[in-house]
Amino acid sequence: MKHNITWLDYHELRPNNTVDGILRIAQEVHSPQLNNKRDILVWLPPSYPYQHRKRYPVLYFFDGQNLFDGHTSYAGEWHVDSTMINLSQEGIEAIIVGLPNNDQRHLEYNPFEESHIGRGKGDKTIEFIAQTVKPLIDNSFRTLPDKWNTGLGGSSMGGGMALFGYLAYPYIFGLCAALSPAYWFGGKKMLDYAAKRYYNGGRIYLDVGTAEGSQKKPRWSKHTYAEMFTESVQTLSQTLLQNGYRNNDTLKFVLDEGGSHSESAWARRLPDALRFLLR
């Protein structure tokens, strides 16, 4: 597949930014799977310009506009750039690909059927990454293209999508960072989907905060919304362990006491997630 893509310097294109390090951007990349376009962001490790033969793992992150630049984020940035610069001092390096969302996020980040929106487009989103974006990145940059060095990451619905894509394409994605994954989409079908997928190699980082969601109790439950969220992600972790994952070896689950459903909480937990996946 040939790609007529131009990679621009983000700092030159958007001088008013908060980005640390080398960030490239390809504008208006077409998705034949979703029949739309979006920018693609690629953050390169500090050693990339100097180690001309070195190849790097690649992590593809959802909600890409929240990763690097405080001016483009809609709820605060993750500071992935500065986190990766700090991790490079520990010998941990990777290429980070940011995939911005659009006004169809509720559909593109849901692979299941919903009563009020119909069939989601999450499966098409994963196909876009696997069939269009990944070949583009592998052809444009010095990557380690095998599954053991290729991962998905995200939070909330993006975290659910990272887990779904990892489970759906185990021969392409061997790493997964699912921060506060939204279990509720598709009527909690994510839990059922994970229960049918047995260990097939790779590593998953999974977390949830105890203060995610409202402290109110719905009339039909004795638990608060926050407690239900925490419980469901814990159930997801237990399900993965029952299906062959090994605690703190191929699955790392973190319960963040007091952690909120926010970019700042995910930014704080991200370094340890990446240490686990890229060790």
Image: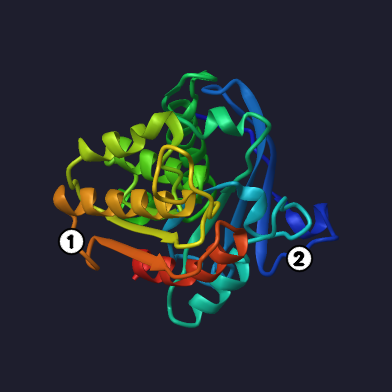
The numbered disc on residue 167 is: none
Disc 1 target residue: 246
- The residue located at (39%, 48%) in the rendering is 222
Residue furthest bottom as drawn = 89
* Residue 266 drawn at (x, y percent): 53, 62
Bin the neighbour count of mark 1 within 10 Å (Cα to Cα): few under 14, some 14-19, many 20 and up.
some
Horizontal side, residue 262 vs residue 184: left or right: right
- The residue located at (47%, 19%) in the rendering is 115
Q: From the viewer's side, name the closer residue of 103 and 189.
A: 189
In the rendered structure, which amino acid carries the disc numbered 2? Thr
* Residue 141 drawn at (x, y percent): 52, 52
Q: Is mark 1 on a helix, strand or loop?
A: loop
The numbered disc on residue 18 is: 2
Q: From the viewer's side, name the closer residue of 246 and 278.
A: 246
- The residue located at (51%, 61%) in the rendering is 211
- Which mark is in front, 1 or 2? 1
* Residue 228 drawn at (x, y percent): 40, 49
Horizontal side, residue 238 vs residue 145: left or right: left
Spatial CA distance of label 1 from label 2 is 38 Å
